[in-house]
Image (tube, helix red, strand yellow):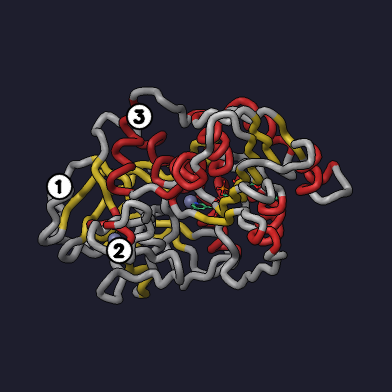
Amino acid sequence: MSTTGKVIKCKAAVAWAPNKPFSIEEVEVAPPKAHEVRIKILATGICRSDEHVVSGALAAPFPIILGHEAAGVVESVGEGVTCVKPGDKVIPLFAPQCGVCDACVNPRGNLCVKTDLNKIHGLMEDGTTRFTCKGKQAYQFINTSTFTEYTVVHESSVVKIDAVAPPEKVCLIGCGFSTGYGAAVNTAKVERGSTCAVFGLGGVGLSVVMGCKAAGASRIIAVDVNKDKFAKAKEVGATECVNPQDFTKPIEDVLKEMTGGIGVDYSFEVIGRPETMKAALASCHINYGVSVIVGVPPSASQISFSPMLLFTGCTWKGCVFGGWKSKDSVPKLVAEYLEKKFSLDPLITHTLPFDKINEGFELLRTGKSIRTVLLF
Ligand code: CND
Ligand code: ZN
Ligand code: ZN
């Protein structure tokens, strides 16, 4: 029996309030309106950005259906949608690509105006959401919402991928892998023979390490307070691992010493803390160092730092989704994965049924997992 044009009742993990476990609820998912696409989610990864909302670090409205790293199949499309059709295998795009705004037409840009990342409102373009739970509207999350059996996204936030791609792996191309890898190859443009430092060795940070390695960096210094992350970091390309807690002096001084007093060519903050953002900047070569903020800053945070660091020539920048133009790049990254140009296996430490989502978040909070993939 076709579900096209009908409300679908299905299971979703609803976050009712900050710092509370997810509740698996029956939700109603409305049919897609014009230029929208309803997707059956097949697999979704758990990313720290989802946890930032649960912990309250990243401000968002509640109740909300989180999740932004997934792969699925198109169930139905609204009027006017031509980019995908029912049955297509797809990846939802938390960084949309409308194709016509300033950032989309500029080759240097990728932060489309349709993004919901600057100040999360959790609504579709018409000011409503497609989710209802217990008679209440549940908010959507950064143009995706993937902790649900079905979701609805705008057509600028979905792209078709090769039908043979395994969803339980390529879901990571929807965020973690692409965000980290792209930060190294697109945003920093790491050069062959250079020295890099990566702060934070979760799924995103390890993907930065992979990007630095692919770009030919000769030294990749991995920094984390959890030493259990070091073996995996070395497996994917780190040449040295450092735990800031092993030193009394600041980590930037440790990194300067390790590089003969000059600092690294490229540094990456992949944690989401103002203090480590400053430390990563201060670890760079004072003249031509480039430091990239990849970790999501807490909504209420401010940074004070010595402008002398920028005056002397350092570059401080950030990137969303690794600087990739999402619609153009995601199908190509999936093709490269299928051609075995990179592996996602080292990033996936746990696979759980969707109902065990709270267990998956506990693994992230306790530093035991890199990526947990939830299967439906
Ligand atoms: P995850 O939590 O898996 O990894 C973070 C790592 O940082 C862990 O291994 C921690 O042990 C480590 N860490 C924590 N505190 C410190 C510290 N003081 N010094 C050194 N290491 C520390 O997170 P993830 O890999 O899923 O995500 C990393 C960040 O990237 C996070 O802030 C997330 O929200 C962000 C992100 C950004 C984007 C984007 O488009 N820019 C997309 N998705 C996620
Ligand atoms: Zn993410
Ligand atoms: Zn755009």
**Secondary element at image label 3:** helix
Q: Nearer the viewer, residue 255 or 288?
A: 288
Under 8 Å from ligand 3: the CB of mark 2?
yes
In the rendered structure, the answer to whether residue 349 lies left or right of residue 112 reads right
Residue 166 position by quadrant: top left
Q: Which mark is residue 336?
A: 3
**Secondary element at image label 1:** loop
Residue 44 position by quadrant: top left
Q: Residue at x 15, y 60 (%)?
A: 78
Q: Nearer the viewer, residue 7 or 320?
A: 320
Q: Which mark is residue 102?
A: 2
Q: Which mark is residue 8?
A: none
CA separation in Å, label 2 and label 1: 27 Å
Q: In the rendered structure, are the residues bearing label 3 and label 1 in contact, judged by CB atoms less than 8 Å apart?
A: no
The amino acid pointed to by label 3 is Glu
**Residue extending farthest right:** 248
| Mark 3 Cα shell of 10 Å, populated few (<14), some (14-19), many (≥20) | few
The amino acid pointed to by label 2 is Asp
Vertical comparison of 349 with 145: above or below: above
| Mark 1 Cα shell of 10 Å, populated few (<14), some (14-19), many (≥20) | some
In the rendered structure, the answer to whether residue 18 lies left or right of residue 250 reads left
CA separation in Å, label 2 and label 3: 28 Å
Q: Residue at x 81, y 51 (%)?
A: 250
Q: In the rendered structure, are the residues bearing label 2 and label 1 in contact, judged by CB atoms less than 8 Å apart?
A: no
State the residue position of label 1: 85
Percent of width and height locating residue 176: 48, 44
User: Which is nearer the N-term, disc 3 or disc 1?
Assistant: 1
